[in-house]
Amino acid sequence: MPNRHIDIYLFALFKPVQPLRKIGGWGEQNNNGKWCVAKQEATDAQLGTNIDWVCSQGIDCKTISPSGTCFDNRLKTLASFIMNVYYQSKGGSEDACSFGGSGIVVTTDPSTSTCVEPN
């Protein structure tokens, strides 16, 4: 029908997504108190590759950018945070923490006072 106005709400077309609690952090327990972090012996090259790969997989990496809530000058801290975000997004699957042998699942919360890691 010409000249007829129809209201369309785009948000109604999308499946709702439950937001991460404490976004930008190490977070609340959802996967039995497990986190994925970088191994102590992981090289800077491995950590950089891990960050680049995770950020290319649709994970929002703004929290580890220089203006982000979890920015840190230590590459291992940045990589651990974003590796864990990916791990948690995959339901805490052991395979999602492999990162070519540079990741490890831990049961000690790696959160800091300024950055609470999702779990």
Image (spheres, grey):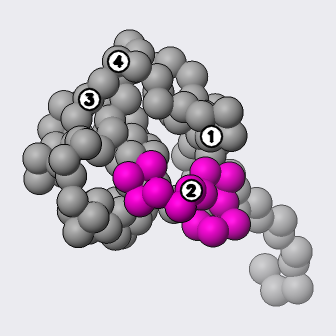
Q: Is residue 67 left or right of residue 42?
A: right
Residue with the most extreme bottom position: 2
State the SS at label 3: strand
Q: Amino acid at mark 2?
A: Asp
- Foreground of the two, 114 or 7: 114
Going by the numbered disc 4, the residue's amino acid type is: Thr
Q: Which residue is mark 2?
A: 72
| Residue 107 numbered mark, or none | 4
Indicate the secondary structure of the residue bearing disc 4.
Answer: loop
Expressed as whole percent of the image width and height from the top left, the position of residue 94 reads 19, 31
Mark 3: few/some/many CA within 10 Å (<14, 14-19, 20+): some
> Spatial distance from mark 4 to mark 2, Cα to Cα?
22 Å
* Tag 4 near tag 3, CB within 8 Å: yes
Whether residue 19 is visible here, answered yes or no, is no
Q: Residues within 10 Å of mark 1 (few under 14, many from 20)?
A: many
Q: Which mark is residue 115?
A: 1
Residue name at image x 45 percent, y 49 percent: 77
